[in-house]
Structures are given as structure tokens and as C-alpha cells.
Amino acid sequence: MSQPARIPLRDEFNSRAHDALGDAQLRRNFRGAMDSLMEKRAAAFSDADERERLRTLGNHIRARALSRLPDLLEQLESNLTANGIQVHWAETTEQANRIVLDIAERRQARQVIKGKSMVSEEMDMNHVLADHGIECLESDMGEYIIQLDHEKPSHIIMPAIHKNADQVARLFERELGEPYTRDVNQLIQTGRRILRQKFFDADIGVSGVNFAVAETGTLVLVENEGNGRMSTTVPKVHIAVTGIEKVVAHLRDVVPLLSLLTRSALGQPITTYINMISRPRQAGERDGPEEVHLVLLDNGRSQAFADSELRQTLNCIRCGACMNHCPVYTRVGGHTYGEVYPGPIGAIITPHLVGLDKVPDHPSASSLCGACGEVCPVRIPIPSLLRRLREENVSRPDPGHAVMRGQGSKYSALESTVWTLWRTLYTRPLLYRLFRFFATRLRALTPSRLGPWTEHRGAPKPAARSLHELARKHLEQSR
Amino acid sequence: MSAKARILDKLRHSLAGTETLPDDFDETLVTEPWRYPPEQRLARLRELMEAVRTEIHLTSQTQWPDLLAALLAEKQLTRLLIAPETDHGRQLTAHWSTRSDASLSTLSLSLSPQGRGDRIDGPVLSPLSLEGRGAGGEGETAAGSGTDSTQEHSPSDLPALHAYDRPVEEWKHELFHDTPASLTGTVGAIAATGSLILCPDRHEPRLMSLVPPVHFALLRASTIHDNLYEAQRALNWRAGMPTNALLISGPSKTADIEQVLAYGAHGPKDLVVLILEDA
Ligand code: SF4
């Protein structure tokens, strides 16, 4: 036994995790970044009492909005429409892409510039547009870097956090012919120069939405770079894409949510730009888009909504704090998850977007240490939701009453029988005593290999005599 | 059935028999920790904005045009984009024409104690910040700049004032390539977060505070609010939002590479706030 045993790999998540764990550079990049994000968050919430009360308020605002979601969506639509913003609804990412393509075709658009938008990642918009001959370029510096390297974001706030300056420098050298420099300022200025021209040329700007305010018909966008403002102001058409859960009732609701978002995400009291868009360019105005569209995407959200426990997933304001604090995410990195949303939030939202059977290992990729739930600014009980999804993973849906798409993919008749037996034994004293008697007498027959359990541990063996028996004997002797 | 009808149907079905949760918004949580005595409001705003590399100068309703001229000279900015129909745009234009024979060097000398002493972060920014040209290929490199001389008011020794008086389509190239600096007003500021509030409109369009590499903003000290909640109320946004409302808290920045903070990502590389203390 000179070779250490290799972990047998059952599926893609595990094999990707295994590779990531062996990549020292990647682990250093993540460790460094997550440590600093955790520190910044802690410093931004110096008053624990204020923080906890604000989290409760954030939770109530989101839960209240969800408790009247259909009404709020209709109110949002009617106020946006009155303001001159066109609202579109899409059940699937295909429908959402179709809406964007129709607008692009009508405007004969050739170039699209994108601010950061996770929903457009769900839609895989860049590739869909490219298939129709439309260039769709990311303008957030992190997103631009990974698009250049044909990668997906590895973090929802810091998409290129898995790369260090050296890796970015080599990428710019290779793809853009820029002279190598590790100087971050110079790298950013290169991005600025190239993307400025793209903002200038683009026919359409695409953005996400952080909060959609129903009472005023306002789209609130939060960012530091100014690329979001560029994308929503320079091109003649602005298309915002967002999930149906992003609506809040009142303008005032945005105040605590903003504070929670920027402090949890980056430890900043506020981001450089808060961009509140309520109308397209009005008569007499000299800039701004002529058309503003909002695409409201379902893509599995109404499924999460249907279950009052799983509905809490939709409270999420996409701050990324759960990822920054997750011991699993920090070690395996975002790409291991293989989906748009990595980390704890990914583990609870992705099953609704793509089906639990497509990502059966995501809910298990957690130590259930509870850090994610503790930091979540809107108090999503992520650990309980993970346990719930684990349960849905192994239970067969009642016909006609499936909780979610793809549930039960880890169901095993054997495992289920074993647990039923176990339950029966432990709830019937007579049966239990019989079982105990034979288990101790026949202990030599217990199997020494028990699947994955024994890959790294010995199999449990019953003792020669049970504690009950030993105790009884002891009492009899001392009597 | 449309996508909208199906989505709403599903949501309504899931809510059947449930109650709307009560609205227990507690405004003390977003106001009380974020209140400042009037004399501290400005200091708080300044501290937060300077922490994100904003340049702040205290001046007055009558003196700011001279200060601005001195700062433009110091930063070697030769053109300034203004909104001619605004009060400050008019004031500046008038000032420029009366000062056309003033000597800029005297001007900057007399104002520099105030002008420079206000900076806290020692080394005068990066080379990028003091020029409109340089790495970005922006500002004054003026490749094929189609400057329309009728737009200019340029006494020989003062930077040229350029008016944003037409739709952007008519001069987009110049805006992107030959506009090193701009001046805008603000409708207020927020002490709690160190933010300026801008509501671009017909007279002062949105791109003024975004495209030029250096953005000068005028702020009347009396319009600084304690926190966003109170600012929203004071501006009565609930009754009707402006087409575009912005909170701006410093120059554009990013930490997307290795968490290293870099300024001048896509928007202005420098934000200079002139605070008018008597207004
Ligand atoms: S689940 Fe909570 S902590 Fe995670 S991204 Fe969403 S809001 Fe942030």
C-alpha cells in the first residue's frame, strides 16, 4: 500500500472538486479574496445589534413582497408602462432570449454591450445572440476578463476572482496583444480603453436589476464601475432582464436593502453608483435610451415559490456573502459547481432553475456549519433549505404532487428499505432486543466493506456484548 | 394563455388561502443610526467621500467660479463641458467673460492654499488623474475632433467652455474623445453614505457625470441630508421619480482583479466636489 488511495469519483461535481482541491494557485486566489471580503463585511457591520435588526427588517421586506408577489408584479408593470418602459414576461430562458432577439432584430442591432447581469447568464445570452450574428460583450471588468477567456463567472459579485493579476496579464497579452504588465491599474485602463469604444458603438445595452420598485415604476441598479450606467445610458435601447422575485413594494424598502447589500457584499457603506431608472429619454432630453425594456423571467422561480419553505430562496438579494463565508466554496471555487450560481445560494436556487436531478450533489456540498445562514442579510435559513433539498433528493414524489422538477434522483430502494427496517427495530422494544442479541453474537458476520463509507474508514462492528447486557450483569454482580 | 397569465396564475395558485404579511417597516432603523448634528453633516460627507478618493473643496456661491478656474489650470484641463441653461452654467459663462483678461497664474496662486490643502491622500493621485489624455486615449487626444467654434466661449487664458446643448447623437464622438472634464450641479447629498444626488434632466443630461474623465460637481451645503430615507422624503420621490436619479459616491472604481482597488474603471477617474457653504 504505497500509493495513497485515490478518491473514487462518482460524478462531475466530485471530480471537479477533486481537481480544484489540487490546484494550489486557485486555492490561494480564493482564500485570499474570501478572507478579505469577510473582514470587510465584519468591519462594515461594527454594531451587531444594528446588524441583526436590519437583517430582520430586510427579511420582512422581502417576505412581505413575496406574500403579494403577483399583485406587486402587476403594479410594477402598470407603473413602468405608464412611465414608458415596456414590460415583457418570459417563463423560460428561451422565451426571454426570443424577446431580446426580437428587439435586436427590429432595431437591426449588431452590437450589444452588457452590464453585469446574472439573469442574462442564466439565459446564456452571449452565446444565443452570437448564434444570430450579434456581438454581445461584457463590460463589467471581471465579466470582460472571463468572457475573453471563455469562462463562466466563479463568483456572483467578483466573477474573475479565481484569477490573479499575472493570469489576467497573460490573458490580455495573448488575446489583446497588450504588453505584459502585472500592474492592476494598467490592466484596468486597458479594459477601459477597449470597452469605451464598445459603449460608443453598441446599439443595445443590457443590464440586470437589483430592485424593481412597484410603487414608482423604477429600476434600481447598483454598481461601482460605471459600466452599468454606460450600458443603460449610451446605447439607443436599454433592455433590463431580471427574475420575477426582484420586486419590492415601496421606494423606502430599497433603503435598508441597499445598505444590507453593499455592506454584506463588499463591506462598503454604498457603491459608487446607485442608478435609478424610471423612464426612457423624454422629449427635449439630450441623452438616454429611446427605448427601455424590462424582461421578467420565471425560469423555475414559481416552482420555488409554490412551497412556503423553499419560497424563502427568493428572498435573495445576490450579495454573495454566503459564498464568501462558505468553507466548501472557499476551497473548491465557483467553477466546481458548474452552474451560473455557485456556493450556498447556488445550491438552493439552481435545483429550481435546472431541476434537482441535474445538480443532485449541490445540496450535499455543504458541511452544514451554518455560516451561510448566519451572514445572509435577508435571513434565508440556507442550512435548513439544504437539508430539505437533500430530503427531496432521496424521496420519490407522490404522483401528481411533485415538489420540484427532478426530485428523487438519489432515491435508492435498498437505502430506503434499510432505513425502514432501522426505524421498525428502534421503535419496537422486543424486536430491538432480538436484533441486539443476534447482532452481538453474530458480529463476525458484519460486512467489512460498506460502499463509500468504508473508502476512508473501517466498518463499524458491534461489540461482543451490548451496553444493556453489560450493565445488567454489573448490577446483578454488585447486588 | 400568455406567459404573463401563466406566471401570475401559478403564483396566485401558490398563495391561495394565505395572508399578505403585515408592513412593519421600522423607519428608526434607517434613520436613527444615521443622524448627524447640522455642523457635522458636512464633515461626515467629506470624510466618507475623501476615503474613496474624492477631492473636496469648500467655497462659496460667489467664489466657486474662480476656484474652478484655478483647479482647471492646476489639472491642465483646457476644456470644460457645461450645461448652459442651468443657473451655475450661466454664472460660469458670465464669469468667464468678465474674467477673460485675468491672469490665471495669479488666480491659482491666490487660491492654492485652499485648493490643495484640502486633499488628504498625499501624492496627487496618479498620472492618469491629472490628464485627460494618457492611457485611455480619451480627453484631449482629439482625434478628428469636430469642435464647433460657435459652441465655445474661450477667452485666451481660460479653459474653453463647451455647452451640452444638442442631442448626444450630434456630437457623440467629441463627447467621448475630446471632453476631458465636465461641471454639473447636484440636488443634494447624503451624509450617512457620502453620496451626491443627481437628477439629470433636459438642461443637464445624464452623460455629463459619466463620460468625461474629470467630473466637477457643485453642492450646496444646505442640501446635505442625513440619510437616504430622509433624502427620498425631502425630494418627494414617492410622488414621482425623475427620469433618472443617481447617487454618486466617488469616482468610478473596481476591485475585480485580485481585490486590488483601481479607480477610473469606466466612469470619471476624478470626482471633484465644490461645496458652497453659504447656500
Ligand atoms: S442567499 Fe443570502 S447571503 Fe447568499 S447571496 Fe443571497 S442574500 Fe446573499
Image: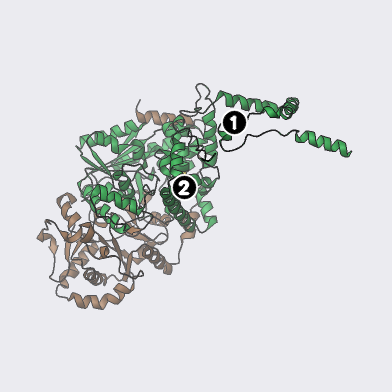
Chain colours: A green, B brown
Mark 1 neighbour class, 10 Å CA radius: few under 14, some 14 to 19, many 20 or more: few
Picture coordinates of residue B211 (x, y %)?
24, 55
Which comes sooner in the sequence, label 2 or label 1? Answer: 2
The residue tagged 2 is A330
Indicate left or right for A433 with B199 as reference. Answer: right
Asked whether residue A412 is in view, the answer is: yes
Q: How many marks?
A: 2
In the image, residue B53 sits, relative to residue A262, either above or below, namely below
Q: Is B34 or B214 nearer to us in this picture?
A: B214
Seen at 13% across and 62% down, the residue is B152
Instruction: Where is residue A471? Give x, y as percent.
Output: 80, 37
Dot 2 falls on a residue whose secondary structure is helix
Which quarter of the picture shows residue B44? Answer: bottom left
Q: Residue at x 58, y 34 (%)?
A: A453
Left or right of residue A343, residue B209 in this image: left
Give, as a three-letter code, the residue at label 2: Thr
Left or right side of A267 for A177: left
What is the quadrant of the N terminus of chain A in the image?
A: top right
Q: Amino acid at mark 1?
A: Leu
Label 2 Cα neighbours within 10 Å, binned few <14 / some 14-19 / many ≥20: many
Label at residue A231: none
Q: Position of residue A265 (x, y in %)?
A: 43, 51
Pointer 2 chain: A
Q: Is residue A41 above or below residue A19?
A: below
Residue B223: name its quadrant.
bottom left
Q: Which mark is residue A450?
A: 1
